[in-house]
Each structure stands twice: as C-alpha cells, then as structure tokens.
C-alpha cells in the first residue's frame, strides 16, 4: 500500500512538472485575456449533455431490475464525481451505487454493464486509432463474448468457488457465492432487454464523441485549432494516464495525457485544464453537495 502511494505521488509530480515546463507565463496571460466565452459555454453545454446521457445509460439498466427513478440515478451519478475525488476511482464507483437504494449488488451489476459497454467502445476507438493488432482484437472479442454469454462466465466462477467451498472455506466462500449470484442476477436482468443493451452502446459512442468535441471547442476558446483526430488521441491518452496513475480524480495525469495527445504548448495546457474542469472537476463540487444531502436524508 505504501509503495502504491509513492508511485501515485510520483505520477502526480511528473505530470505537474511536465505541464509546468510547457507553459509560458506571458503566453498564458494572453490566452486567458483573449479567451472566447462563447466556445467555453458550448463546451460546458456538451459536458452537461454528457452527464445526462451517462446517467440515462445507467438508469435504463437500473429501471430493468429495480425501477430506480432518473432523479435518484442522477443524484448518485453526480455524487460519484466527488467520491472519486476523495477516494480511489474504483472505491468511488462502489460507494455511489449505494445511493440508488434497492438491492446493492444488482445495482452494482447494472453500473458495471454500462461501464463495460463504454470500455468496449473506447477500446474499439483505440484499436482503430493505433492500428488493429491481433492481441487487441482478441481482448475485444473476449470482453464482448463475456457480455453476451455471461451465463457461461458465471457458471465458471461459481464452479471455481464451489471447489474451494468443498475444500473447507465454507463460511467465506458461501458468502462470496451469494454475492456472485446477486451480481449475476442483476447483470442478467439488466441486459435482458436487448433494445436497452444495444442502446447502451449507442449512448456510449455519443458520450465519447461529446467529450472529444468538447476538447475541440475548448481549444477554439484559446485560439488553438485541434483536429478531430488529435482530440480523440488526446482523449484516449488522458483516459490511459488517469487510469494508470492511481491519482484521485486523475488530477494532473488527465491533463498530462491530453497535452501529449493534442501537442505540447501553453495553449494546449490551458485547454487541458479548462476542459477537465468543465467536464469533471466542476461536477466534483456539485457532487459533494448532492452526496451530503443524501447523507442528511439518511
């Protein structure tokens, strides 16, 4: 655990040091002074739409298994931005699921299936962008098969746990098997509606497109022309570095990856920070309010 914290701190320092090196103070002042509010408002509108569609994707699966309202789903989803700022991202996801109520493990599986469709779309874009490789196609195919034939995956995991249950770890393994059964039940119920399942892929594609479009619009605000290809590359690099860094909310690593993708310059660094603020950090503030309101309501 201590080594992980050291590596996380190192990733943060390296990211910030690199960003500091590419920034020219005079150019920064000029970029901020001449920034176009119009493009920033367009980008912010795109971020709002991204949040709404991301919430809708989760809500569609939740509605299939336990009838959670869109309002409750939105509150939990927004709270997640705050939770992933103060907690590791994986823990933040686990905690925000509790806020939607109902059966926790079924709700968790509904979130997992939505995230899985987005991961598949991101991987597809990455494979297309970086060039198709046999290993990449194989990984993509395995994930897709796991989504479609989840019953086989469930039976394999359950058989594995059953073996250890017979060995002698009955108490713990019985609990894990019960959790696995509830997760599988929620997963199966969530994807039972084929229209919703296919719609989640469409929503994931649109959500990614809106974020890439947002990078282009923020760049325009500071006089930086970013092509769709460079914006997509920056988005993919941002996701990659934030995921690997382990930094809460990916602060620093997000911007580091984005600057590497769109090209190192002062305007690129400003674009990266403003983009992440509009599409993520501002919702951490809103999410904190939503989270503590939920706690006050019990």
Image: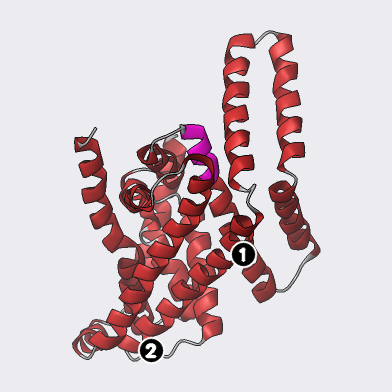
Which residue in the rendered view is the most extreme toward the top?
A: 168
Instruction: Say which quadrant the C terminus sits in.
Output: top left
Q: Nearer the viewer, residue 59 or 50?
A: 59
Whole-percent x, y for residue 238 in the image: 47, 66
Chief secondary structure of the magenta portion: helix
- The verdict on residue 293 being magenta is no
Q: Secondary structure at mark 2?
A: loop
Q: Quadrant of residue 17?
A: bottom left
Q: Residues within 10 Å of mark 2 (few under 14, many from 20)?
A: some
Q: Image height check: is 110 above or below 27?
A: above
In the image, which residues are magenta? Answer: 104-111
Query: Which mark identifies residue 262?
Result: none
Position above or below: 111 against 51: above
Label 1: few (<14), some (14–19) or many (≥20) C-alpha neighbours in 10 Å: some
Q: Is residue 197 above or below residue 86?
A: below
The residue labelled by disc 1 is 121
Of discs 2 and 1, which sits in the foreground?
1
- Left/right of residue 180 with respect to residue 11 in the rendered view: right
Image vertical order of residue 162 relative to residue 223, above or below:
above
Image location (x, y in percent) of residue 104: 46, 33
Q: Nearer the viewer, residue 121 or 76?
A: 76
**Residue at the spot 46% in from the left edge and 41% down from the top edge:** 4
Q: Is residue 110 magenta?
A: yes
Count of marks, rendered view? 2
On residue 224, which mark appears? Answer: 2
Residue 263, given in percent of the width and then of the height, sits at: 47, 81
Q: What is the x, y in percent for residue 292? A: 22, 42
Tell me the quadrant of the picture where the N terminus can be found.
top left
């Amino acid at each position: 655990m201590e080594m992980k914290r050291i590596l996380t701190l190192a990733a943060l320092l390296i990211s910030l040091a690199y960003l500091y090196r590419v920034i020219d103070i005079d150019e920064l002042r000029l970029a901020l002074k001449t920034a176009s509010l119009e493009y920033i408002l367009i980008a912010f509108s795109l971020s709002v739409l991204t949040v709404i569609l991301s919430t809708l994707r989760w809500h569609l699966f939740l509605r299939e298994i336990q009838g959670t309202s869109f309002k409750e789903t939105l509150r939990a989803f927004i709270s997640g931005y705050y939770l992933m700022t103060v907690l590791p991202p994986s823990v933040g996801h686990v905690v925000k699921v509790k806020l939607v109520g109902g059966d926790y493990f079924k709700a968790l599986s509904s979130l997992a299936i939505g995230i899985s469709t987005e991961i598949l779309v991101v991987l597809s874009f990455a494979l297309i962008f970086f060039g198709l490789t046999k290993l990449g196609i194989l990984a993509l195919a395995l994930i897709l098969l796991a989504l479609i034939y989840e019953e086989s995956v469930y039976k394999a995991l359950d058989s594995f746990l059953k073996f250890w249950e017979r060995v002698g770890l009955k108490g713990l393994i019985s609990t894990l098997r019960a959790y696995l059964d509830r997760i599988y039940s929620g997963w199966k119920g969530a994807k039972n509606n084929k229209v919703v399942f296919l719609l989640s892929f469409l929503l994931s594609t649109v959500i990614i497109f809106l974020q890439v479009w947002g990078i282009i619009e923020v760049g325009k605000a500071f006089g930086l022309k970013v092509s769709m290809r460079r914006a997509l590359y920056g988005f993919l690099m941002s996701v990659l570095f934030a995921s690997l860094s382990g930094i809460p909310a990916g602060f620093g690593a997000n911007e580091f990856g984005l600057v590497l993708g769109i090209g190192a310059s002062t305007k690129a660094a400003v674009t990266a920070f403003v983009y992440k603020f509009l599409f993520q950090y501002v919702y951490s503030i809103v999410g904190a309010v939503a989270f503590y309101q939920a706690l006050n309501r019990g």
